[in-house]
Image (tube, rainbow, N blue to C red):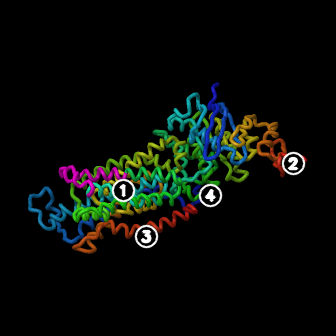
Amino acid sequence: MSTVGSALPSPVAVAPARRAWSRPVLLALTLVLAVLAAVQFGAVPISAADWLNGPWSDAPKTGGAHVLWQLRLPRLGLTLAVGAALGLAGALSQALFRNPMAEPSLLGVTSGAAAAVALTLTVFAGLHAALPAEVRLWLLPLVGFCGALAVCFALDRLSRWLAPGSIAALLLCGLALQAMTFAIVGLCSFIANDEQLRAINFWTLGSLAGANWIMAAVMGGALLVLGALALRVAPRLNALALGAAAAAHVGIDVERLRWQCIGMVALLSALAVAWCGSIGFIGLMAPHLARQLVGADQRRVLPNAMLAGALLLVVADSFARTLAVPAEIPVGVFSALIGAPWFLVLLRGAVRRMGSA
Amino acid sequence: MASLLTLQDVRVTLGGTAIGPVTVRVEPGERIAILGPSGAGKSTLLRLIARELRPSAGLLHFDGRPLATWSSSDLARRRAVLPQQHGVAFGLPVELVVALGRVARQGDGHQDRIVREALAHAQAEHLHGRRFDTLSGGEQARVQLARVFAQAWDARDGLLLVDEPVAALDPGLSVSLMAAMSDFAAARGHALVAVLHDLNLALNHFDRLWLLKAGRMLADCDALPSTLPLLEQLYDTRLRLLADDHGLAILPLLGHLTGARA
């Protein structure tokens, strides 16, 4: 790519082609380093022998080998997949709402899924318990999806009806929906017994402690499918940045594209919530980091937001696991502690650029 | 030859303003300026033709078929729209904004070349590589115009709909871009329908005028000096016509039409 008008180099020029690949590669390398560090550090030290004592070996899995192969690696796999899913869900919802401040957990989508899960665990506990265990694993993602979809749909309609194009209106609509879903979760906690209460707490705080290989594999598979789908709609998502009317003028079926986005955001949020609880702000930070690195073209934002989301969650979960050994801090607490101040800084920038919210 | 676009007794209501009934047609290759005082419904009429709004009554046909039955991508190959407001979310690079004009085309091998030529045609080639959200209003207008050029670049006998395309530009640029738009349309047989406030551009660059007042079509006439009384009536303002070898100029005079001669 040669540049026209190179006599006028601009300080705000888009990254030239030479840098186009170096930054995503750097991001990926950082992720690999974070993963290696996350495997190595924890309550139980891991030795080289433990690495060799994998599923292929007949030696008894004790101590480090058990921790490595049954706890830490599946957890890491799930963390990577969930982090990438949250990053992708954030990038998609920002493109959908044409709003750099949008994020599934801020908009109540995640808590919509949590509310549906909480209802299933308490009000419909009898029904839930009657199901065989292997079905129960899938029931929560399914009801979570329904809850997330309902909030996503309501949000799309409400924000376009109340004040199209306004960052503040969208966030306020999200706030109202979130309050409603929190009320449902609160009601469920109120009527829950001790065991159900612990389960609900797990979901509202967010934790990756329950990970196993099945969850990691399913989440990874779902991510591959949804990631491929998202990359296919990425060029059309760029057109959405022109506004709904102009996107239609250049030949985009806007209504269909909106539905595809809503479906993907709801599915990604629900999968993440159902097994790990609600982990906020990753979906806000990851796409923002991606745009800083590679510019605003969605074809590059989406994959890099997935990488950044995975990186952020691996780092956050490593701290959550190791800071208070042998106890564990819920990772959702951690991401919110870092994410909320970040959100305020971003909000300041967004409001300045728009002149007002 | 069949008309490119026909409106028959079309009505539309948006907010408090009702438009119509409007009965007009656009012939292939024709250049039409929509004129009228602020709030007359010019942009609403244009958005109706652009299929942003649906008519509440009447028939609206594009190239012989009801406009509502066209698929988005088929329509995008025949008509391009430059809206009045052109905000772009996020900091997309200029060349990507222009390339979005061609997003509905599959396997578009000439995209990079067309994007460059479209930018050059809109006198914006120096903006290649910049972020759209860092541009001034006039620069953004030129990039959006380049996007419209890119969309209609290799189409024939299409339709360009532009809403105040040169409002944010200085006099020199507005004349040269109006001429560029006119040439672009003429070279490809595109019809051009523009909402304008500048009477001089309308008289010098267009074939026909649609005069819209309070949602009604006051007149559908040729863009000739003889329309001056109609224009005075349209804006309720006295006008003077000045003409020389370079073209026509209209000078608005102080005072309302009615009672001004007393």
Q: Residue at x 67, y 53 (%)?
A: B168
Q: Type of residue at label 4?
A: Ser
Number of other residues with Cα within 10 Å of mark 3, as a class: few under 14, some 14 to 19, many 20 or more: few
Is disc 4 on the same chain as disc 2?
yes
Number of other residues with Cα within 10 Å of mark 4, as a class: few under 14, some 14 to 19, many 20 or more: few
- Disc 1 is placed on an element classified as helix
Number of other residues with Cα within 10 Å of mark 1, as a class: few under 14, some 14 to 19, many 20 or more: many
Q: Type of residue at label 3?
A: Pro
Q: Residue furthest top?
A: B1
Magenta-highlighted residues:
A122-148
Residue situated in front as seen by the camera: B151 or A43: A43
Q: Main secondary structure of the magenta part?
A: helix
Mark identifier at residue A341:
3
Q: Which residue position is annotated with label 2?
A: B260
Locate residue A23 relative to residue A241 in the image: left or right: left
Residue A2 on image: x %, y %: 52, 52
Disc with the residue nearer the chain's start (1 vs 3):
1
Mark identifier at residue B136:
4
Q: Residue at x 58, y 30 (%)?
A: B63
